[in-house]
Amino acid sequence: MQLQLPSSISVQDFLDHYWQKQPLLMRNAIQNYDFCLTPEELAGLACEEEVESRMVLRHGEQDWELRHGPFDDETFTRLPDQDWTLLVQDVDKYLPEVAQLLQAFQFIPSWRFDDIMISYAVPGGSVGPHTDTYDVFLIQARGQRRWQIGNRAKDPELLPDLPIRVLKDFEPEQEWLLKPGDVLYLPPEVAHWGIGEGGGCMTWSVGLRAPSVPELLGSLAQYLLDHIPEDAHFTDPPLSPQESPAQILPDALATVSRKLDHWLLDEDLRLRWFGCFSTEVKEHLFIEPREETVQQAQLASLLTREPWQRHPFSRWAWSERPQGRGLYLFVCGEAFELPGSCREQARRLCDDHRLNPDLLQDAEPALLQVLVQLVNENWLEPCND
Ligand SMILES: [Mn+2]
């Protein structure tokens, strides 16, 4: 399955001219896919303890009332006929048929994706005009939704004292009615407002990850703290008596900078951090390790007995280390070192839909050791179907 871009736009055109730059409406861009999930099934998910869900009521206890799940049947029976919406996060993690839709977006690195959030809206239902900090593909799955978009705006003014971020001033510049199969791509910070029209509007939002620079720096700093020796200390440059002993001279700063840069600019260490960071799994999507641990000798028979897959909560990436030092396989915030000869296996572990047991043929001991850990962490698991 592949996203059907308008015929005049190639994938490369999309990436060059639209991706992170400007919105694009794509009529009938999802074909040959059955948006099977019903509003009732979505409501069912929103009643589950571990699933993250919200409801926004235009005229509730207050304007734009926000309720957090899990919900119960009674909540749903008491809702008005219009002006509310239900949003469920990470539906791709719970329903493999939803995760399958991500295959339509293989022209973007898979570790950039966050989740598929699915929303249901009755007539008039919406979360209000707002901006997001990340890219999103808004896919109309059922019914119809009217989308209005405005300008790109950093730090726009919001309506005060609301539990959700609603823009104070929203001037629509373009407007479309989306029907099933239509997709609207929005780069970060484009003001948008999608309102359910008619009954049973369902929109699937494929959201990307966009960590802030402070978040990146915080994570990098913590990673360095965890991975560099504690016994590296400040040392002086060659000293001479100073005119003012209180003065910090350029030499002192240069010395401390060199010390820090040694670690900050270590490319391999930084790659290792970034791979771990990019494959971290949200806390509430915790994966329980396997109860009975597996030994390397059991691996072949175990993996060939039945089909295996990546755990639906798990995140995977791989990279070549600088200076030909082999590879990193990143899974759920952990880095595994592999020799360069395992390139094809690392790639297939991350890219293939299912684990192909022929991966084990002529597998090097290093790869087998990693596979054992992946199985024991449950990051690889038998297929459930
Ligand atoms: Mn949005």
Image (spheres, rainbow, N blue to C red):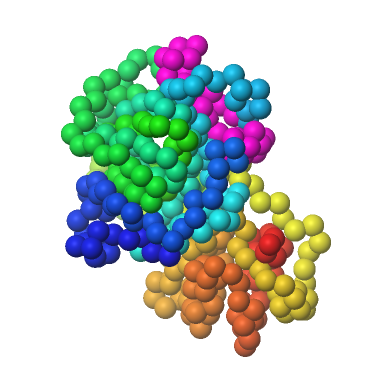
Residue visible at 19% across and 62% down in the picture: 8
Residue visible at 43% across and 72% down in the picture: 320
Q: Can you see residue 81?
A: yes
* Left or right: where 62 falls relative to 354: left
293 in magenta: no
| Image height of 139 relative to 63, above or below | below
Q: In which quarter of the view is residue 76 placed?
A: top right
Of residues 183 and 167, the one nearer the viewer is 183
Q: Which residues are magenta?
A: 42-69
- Location of the C terminus by quadrant is bottom right
Q: Can you see residue 215?
A: no
Query: Whole-percent x and y of residue 374?
Result: 65, 65
Q: In which quarter of the view is residue 63 placed?
A: top left
Residue visible at 78% across and 76% down in the picture: 298
Can you name the residue that lies furthest to the front here?
Answer: 198
Query: Whole-percent x and y of residue 191?
Result: 27, 34
Of residues 27 and 98, the one nearer the viewer is 27
